[in-house]
Image (cartoon, helix red, strand yellow):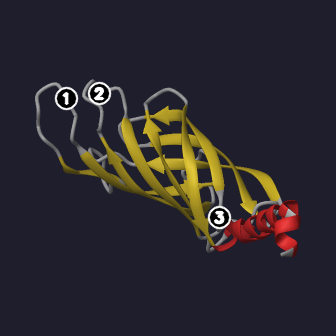
Amino acid sequence: MAAARCPWLVLTTTLLVLLACSGAGAAEKLTHISFYFHEVPSSAPNPTIVTVAGLNVTGSTFGDLQVFDNPLREGADPSSTLIGRARGLVVAASLDNSGMVSITEFVFSNYGHYSGSTLASLGHLTIPVVTERSIVGGTGVLRFARGYYTTQVISSTSDLGVALFNVYFTTKL
């Protein structure tokens, strides 16, 4: 009976319960980290990326599927400190060869506070321009991470490709 006379009380209580359950209002912190992605192409010894399926259509890479397990380093130099691995898939999913879809898990093994944690990403990849992809989750101290990162190719030879990754994300505190 009291609720019928105070509809705003029911509405306010319902909204407070929904906010509490959804985690809305939880503090979030924007973080920026950067590291270097080192990739050895399949044409070089000990490749870190290989094509596992392809349609072999002349003049097109459409349908090609590649897997990778690339080192992540603090610097562009191949001898710089190893901080983790980038593991995932790249699919040539555009008919005009304008780009690919990449699914990547960044696994941090020696990166200070982030050691033992991961970031998951998904997005459109074009080479050699600067690209932006989504951070869609994480584990460990990066659980519930969301954000984006940019990738810029620093150097590319027949033996090694190096890209700078600038990662921006928030996590719930």
Residue at 29% over, 27% down: 97
Quarter of the image containing the N terminus?
A: bottom right
Is 26 positioned to the left or the right of 171 in the image?
right
Q: Nearer the viewer, residue 133 or 128?
A: 133
In this rendering, the label closer to the viewer, 3 or 2: 3
Residue matched to label 2: 97
In primary-sequence order, the first of circles 1 and 3 is 1
Q: Nearer the viewer, residue 133 or 34?
A: 133
In primary-sequence order, the first of circles 2 and 1 is 1
| Residue 168 pos. (x, y %) | 69, 47
| Residue 46 pos. (x, y %) | 32, 57
Q: Residues within 10 Å of mark 2 (few under 14, many from 20)?
A: few
Q: Which mark is residue 144?
A: 3
In primary-sequence order, the first of circles 3 and 2 is 2
Residue matched to label 1: 60
In this rendering, the label closer to the viewer, 1 or 3: 3
| Residue 111 pos. (x, y %) | 68, 65
Secondary structure at numbered mark 1: loop
Q: Is residue 51 visible?
A: yes
Residue 116, by quadrant, is bottom right
